[in-house]
Amino acid sequence: MDGTLSGRFLRGLALAPDRPALRVDGVDTTYRELHERALVLAGSLLAGLPDRPPAVGVLAGKGPTAYAALLAGLYSGVTVVPLQPAFPAARTRQMIEAAGVGALLADDDALPALTALHAEGVGLPTLFAPGGQPMPALAVDGDSALKAPMPARPADIAYVLFTSGSTGRPKGVPVTHANTAHYFGLLDERYDFGPHDVFSQTFDLNFDCAMFDLFCAWGAGAALVPIPPQAYAHLPEFVAEQGMTVWFSTPSAITLVRRTGGLEPGALPSLRWSFFAGEALSCKDAEDWAVAAPRATLENLYGPTELTITVTAQRWTPGQYLNDMVPIGAVHPGHEVLLLDAEGAPTGDDEGELCIAGPQSTPGYLDPGDDTGRFLDHGGHRFYRTGDRVRRAQDGGWLYLGRQDAQVQVHGVRTELAEVDAAARTCPGVEDAVTVAVPVDGTVELAVFHTGEPVPPARLARHLRELLPAAVVPRAYHHLDTLPLNSNRKTDRRKLASQATAMRQTAGTARTHERRQESQ
């Protein structure tokens, strides 16, 4: 079991059976307790189904029962598909169908999502659901508890996560036990995590970075503490109260904590490690965090879901860097790197689109049709095209230059602008739509320009909330008679992006002027 995610939890269980594996709302759950609960749930799941399903969905937030449900899915020995209860039901149904989910494990907060899924025509057997839920119920039966987690082979798919798709349909990314074994093996060599560490858990369970938190902590016998939203307003106090030693979040969290006054010098003295990923990390953000957490080693991590959580790391040291952004660092050992020029051809230059091949790469999307344009065979290796432009740094690592295509990170959630375009075009009255990214406080917000009828912004936003994750629902909507074209007769996205940025700045200036007048 050593090469599986279940095996990592068993390692933590052996190291610290009676220490907390999880602390939610001040309540500790020990490794032994979480292990025994997961064995009961996994056994009940398998006993309640006529056949072992190809995949189980885990519909869970970050409450006390969510983690037992996730671990039970892994213990069952089948592919786990983390599902976010806050996502639109239609989107979740697409994921369920694409991954071949045959049953659900749901946490205590999933009832509204289960009800919405049922209205979408989903009727899967469901375990660990609140009373009165609409799905066919599976009983929790202690007599059916497994004696040990079900075995898995290296090539078996551990979990499937979904990323944005340009057609408006999410793309399923299968990650194997071999992928995660290589990844966590490297992290074990790089870091000194142990049973006395306490990890933050800022990411939702359907976000790949959450796997870093869970299985770095659980592989070391450490405790995991989900961060409640209200904690950010008083983060130094919360971190101190929990005795937190390892922090991991998107860089957007730095901006949030700065606004609440939580980045005073020495404000986070208990942290030993600080990690950031999901967005570009600015030097200013790194410097400010390092001042607040002076005893912590800070690293900038990078990696798309298709390359198993993160595939590069840069240890932060103060200095001058390109565009005042922290480099993404060196690619993990065992991988090959290829750069492509603007035409998509291999180049010997030190700048281009980053492509990576190696043991962390997914075997391909659930739908092989999605592989087109994302994978490249070259020199006997199968490379994943990240779509990110990089430049080689003097130390041999990589500097991040930006996106090659129309993919963006919005508050750590990767999305293709074409998916938002496609969703906006389904709104009644909209003829065409183009989405652009507007830089705001170290991250981006999305703005939509649309033609057709002058659909009110509130109606468009309401429509998109039914189709897209909340983090990527655009903040601004602008009606145009026609979309501008560039010299190649293509939609001039650059002009629209500039226009959206200017309009946001104008609106901000107007609001500031109004507040000043009100205060006089």
Image (spheres, helix red, strand yellow):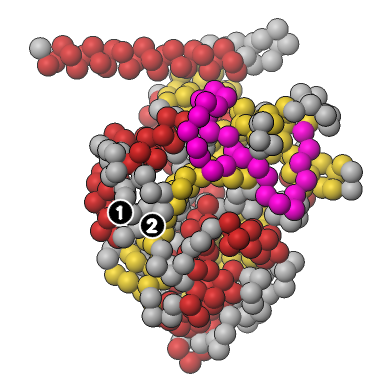
Amino acid carrying mark 1 in the image: Val
Quadrant for residue 240, please give it.
bottom left
User: Residue 429 in the image: x percent, y percent?
Assistant: 51, 25
Name the quadrant of the N terminus: bottom right
Amino acid carrying mark 2 in the image: Thr
Instruction: Please tell me which residue is depicted at 51% across the width and 40% down the height of the picture.
Output: 316
User: Residue 57 in the image: x percent, y percent?
Assistant: 55, 64
Mark 1 residue crowding within 10 angstroms, few (<14) / some (14–19) / many (20+): many
Of residues 209 and 99, the one drawn nearer to the viewer in this rendering = 209
Name the quadrant of the C terminus: top left
Q: Is residue 440 left or right of residue 338?
A: left
Of residues 372 and 8, the one drawn nearer to the viewer in this rendering = 8
In the drawing, what numbered circle is on residue 193?
none
In the drawing, what numbered circle is on residue 245?
2
Mark 2 residue crowding within 10 angstroms, few (<14) / some (14–19) / many (20+): many
Of residues 350 and 451, the one drawn nearer to the viewer in this rendering = 350
